[in-house]
Amino acid sequence: MGIIRRAVLHSRPGKNSEPVAENFFVEEANLPDGIAEGQVKVQTLYLSVDPYMRCRMNEDTGADYLLPWKLDDVADGGGIGVVEESKHGSFTAGDTVYSLNWPWQTRAIVEGKILQKLDPELVDGHLSYFLGAVGMPGLTALFGVKEKGHVTPGASQTMVVSGAAGACGSLAGQIGRLEGCSRVVGISGSDEKCSILVSELGFDAAVNYKRGNMTQKLREFCPAGVDIYFDNVGGDVSDVVLSQMNQNSHVILCGQISQYNKDVPYPPPLSPQTEAALRDKNITRDRFLVLWYADKHEAGILQLSQWVREGKLKVRETVTKGLENIGAAFQSMMKGGNIGKQIVLVSEE
Ligand code: NDP
């Protein structure tokens, strides 16, 4: 038996409240020595905290593809680690592996079928990128832009991205540019984030939605109106963007984080005025889930990793150290404490 640490869901915030670090509790437990046929013993390196986990904190997630976390049970999510011992034919000790359902433990015994082997060379050894730019958020940005953006090179399109300094948003804007948008404008929640968007990530301009007159700023930065809107946040911010969209333009409905601490369905209902504006201007706004494009994930990962290695896609991360801080990292990400992908470093490689 070995002593491990694990993070369990200690309490539910309730559908109409902000989650707090104390909703999670870190405790010690025993990990058995032996593993059964088909199982793999892993050491955890990095864990991901993501907005969809807010739904998993509710008794009813409101989404058929998401199971609720159980009270006093170990939470799980995207994770990366190293195989210590394997009784599954696809893995051997020393392999770097990923799972979308990695238990929030320092070490764990898992079924081999939940793991995927990773090639560290794809990310030049920067393994946490597999949770961000070369992982689920990167694929979300890539397929969102490609499948729902209708980007046409040479058509002088303006793309606006909300949640622009976050994991998906920071990549979506850059991918919009790589795919052929002529102008990319970000919206984020601090001056520091806005300045990074422009100076490091190649956005043409950025608006801090928490300060000043956003309507006016956006109009100034998008003089020809908005052709493509990559929407991560919904709510008031999106109402402003939607009011400045052009005829026959496109919304990439990625997420609506401003509404996740409210008891509303997904996607949350729009105001009658906004609904009418979408209809009148023939604006598309389909639902979009990265999980729907599983058959294209492998090719997407190769594309993203190539862009990162070539320096065409700049990557930002906010790394919190220690499993004991995973609840705080989640709370902070939900409130905008992160720049780029929020990662939790559990143990050094
Ligand atoms: P981020 O890294 O973008 O982190 C969340 C960010 O949301 C915060 O940094 C904060 O930035 C912003 N935010 C929080 N509250 C508000 C608010 N009330 N109004 C405006 N912005 C707010 O997370 P991800 O990149 O992982 O996720 C971004 C979105 O993409 C989420 O809505 C998520 O659900 C969605 N998503 C959808 C997927 C799909 O398949 N459709 C897959 C993955 C993610 P700021 O400082 O700017 O406020």
Image (cartoon, rainbow, N blue to C red):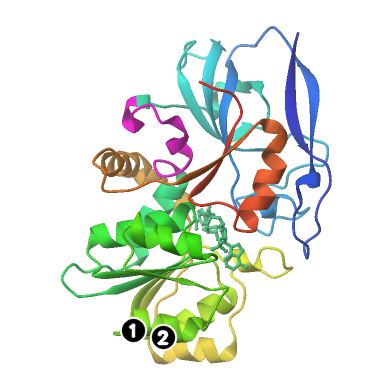
Which residue matches tag 1?
Answer: 225
Residue 345 is marked as: none
x then y, percent, for residue 36: 64, 11
Dividing the image into 4 quarters, which one contains the N terminus?
top right
x then y, percent, for residue 3: 76, 14
Residue 161 or 264: which is nearer the viewer?
161
Which residue matches tag 2?
Answer: 244
Residue 47 or 252: which is nearer the viewer?
47
Ligand number 1: quarter of image: bottom right
Q: Amino acid at mark 2?
A: Gln
Q: Is residue 18 magenta?
A: no
Q: Is residue 124 magenta?
A: yes
Measured along the vertical axis of the image, is residue 29 above or below residue 233?
above
Labelled pair 2, 1 in contact (Cβ < 8 Å): yes
Which secondary structure lies at badge 1?
loop
Which secondary structure lies at badge 2?
loop
Q: List the single residue furthest toward the left.
A: 154
